Image (tube, rainbow, N blue to C red):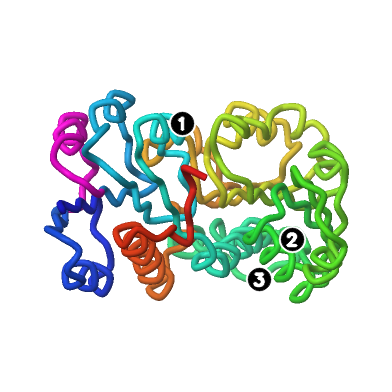
Amino acid sequence: MKILVTRAWPKATEDRLTNAGLGDVTLRHPDTPMSHDEWMDAAKTYDVIMPTVSDKIPAEFYPAAKGKVKIFANYGVGFNHIDIDAAAANDITVTNTPDVLTDCTADLAMGLLLAAARRIGEGERETRAGGWEGWRPTHMIGKKVSGATLGIIGFGRIGQAMARRAHNGFGMRVVFQDAWEVPEDIKAANGNAEQLPSMVDVAAEADFLSLHCPGGADTFKMINAIIFGAMKPGAILVNSARGDVVDEDALFEALDSGKLAAAGLDVYHNEPALDPRFLKYENIVLAPHLGSATDGTREAMGFRAIDNLEAFLKGDTPGDLVTPK
């Protein structure tokens, strides 16, 4: 059994994997993205591949891997970097790692909201550059968070965790949109959140709009000019979900027009190849996909991926099966 880990993991998780007796483990060091040729070689070489969100898997990989690669034991909850239909068609099982990164991702989203609202990034840059001239009543005026309305798009684990932080910590009213009708007890337990019929309705109510939906074809650029147009003047966008959920051209237009006061972003189209237009906006907080980046969480993600792999290799159903269902 040959196992490939596509990117470097925390040492504790790599140690557990290599000592688990599951097979011949390849740990890729240095920690760089795999090339097209490396992916095509992997299709014929490995029985197990443990990818991450940063992997760019060629379409040609899937048919080439049929009969050899048995499972993608994904490191991460998001799996829009994997063509799920192609994996299923070529007999590749896919698992992911939900739950373990919920709190840290919600913490990061709340941090982005606060940083954007209170202009923390702008203030730090001014201070470091020696431009701070002292306290004055009109300096770096931001947006009050406590008591404001938070709109959430996607009310799954992370969206609910964000709602609790906003309501319990800052007394915020929470409204949300989700593809499914959320039971009343779940709403009550998560900030007494109110489910509204559409994203437009949520955008119109929100002082802050925070995205917690999956990426992929169904949500591609769904935060577009229509949604930005529905938002209150001076609202703030937070995205810790997936970059392709937001139409970046529409985002820039909303910032240029003043419709949006600011944004706090952790994810982008084609990351890490950031659109250079982002760099001109002092009122955007730019983070390099740090949602789950704490020591305990990144280790837990690896352990969860290994748990799924161990179950699969024993012939059991992995706990976090994505496909086949």
Residue plotted at (83% across, 63% down): 187
* Three-letter amino acid code at the position of disc 1: Asp
Q: Earlier in the sequence, mark 1 or mark 2?
A: 1
x then y, percent, for residue 11: 23, 71
Disc 1 is placed on an element classified as: helix
Q: Is residue 181 left or right of residue 125?
A: right
Magenta extent: 31-48
The residue carrying pointer 1 sits among few (fewer than 14), some (14 to 19) or many (20 or more) residues within 10 Å by Cα, namely: few
Residue 142, numbered label = none
- Res 288 visible: no
Q: 59 above or below 295?
A: above
* Three-letter amino acid code at the position of disc 2: Thr
Q: Please name the residue that numbered disc 3 is placed on.
A: 135
- Res 302 visible: yes
Disc 3 is placed on an element classified as: loop
Q: Is residue 245 left or right of residue 3?
A: right
Mark 3 and mark 2: Cα distance apart in space: 9 Å
Q: Please name the residue that numbered disc 1 is placed on.
A: 85
